[in-house]
Amino acid sequence: MFDIQITGTNIRYADDGISVVHVQFRANDSESTVTLNGYIPISAEDYQGNESIPALKNVVRTKLIERLTPEAE
């Protein structure tokens, strides 16, 4: 399991409110042999209600899994 640390958020606004949130993260496996870092863009809808650090960690984990898992052909 990866330990995910949220290192920052960058909220981009549009005329009617938040348009997208970039959640910066760093993740290490339990042996610190694999490290991931970067940002995951999430929609305003995904951000709403998930503003806390524990909730953002879950959103990042879910989005990472989606990106790392190849789609069935």
Image (cartoon, rainbow, N blue to C red):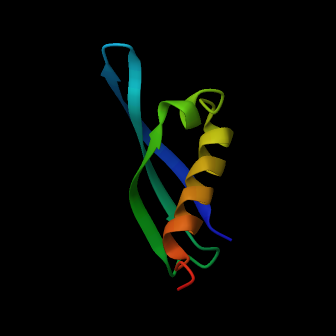
Residue 66, compared with residue 38, is above or below; it is below
Farthest front residue in view: 73
Quadrant in which residue 12 is drawn: top left
Nearer-the-camera pick, 15 or 65 = 15
Nearer-the-camera pick, 12 or 55 = 12
Farthest top residue in view: 16
Q: Residue at x 54, y 51 (%)?
A: 5
Q: Residue at x 40, y 61 (%)?
A: 37
Where residue 33 sits: x, y (%)? 51, 82
Where residue 69 sits: x, y (%)? 56, 76
In the displayed structure image, the side of residue 1 where residue 21 appears, left or right: left
Nearer-the-camera pick, 15 or 49 = 15
Nearer-the-camera pick, 63 or 29 = 63
Residue 28, compared with residue 10, is above or below; it is below
Q: Residue at x 68, y 71 (%)?
A: 1
In the displayed structure image, the side of residue 54 where residue 70 appears, left or right: left
Residue 67, compared with residue 16, is above or below; it is below
Where residue 58 sits: x, y (%)? 66, 50
Q: Residue at x 57, y 83 (%)?
A: 72
In the displayed structure image, the side of residue 14 where residue 29 appears, left or right: right
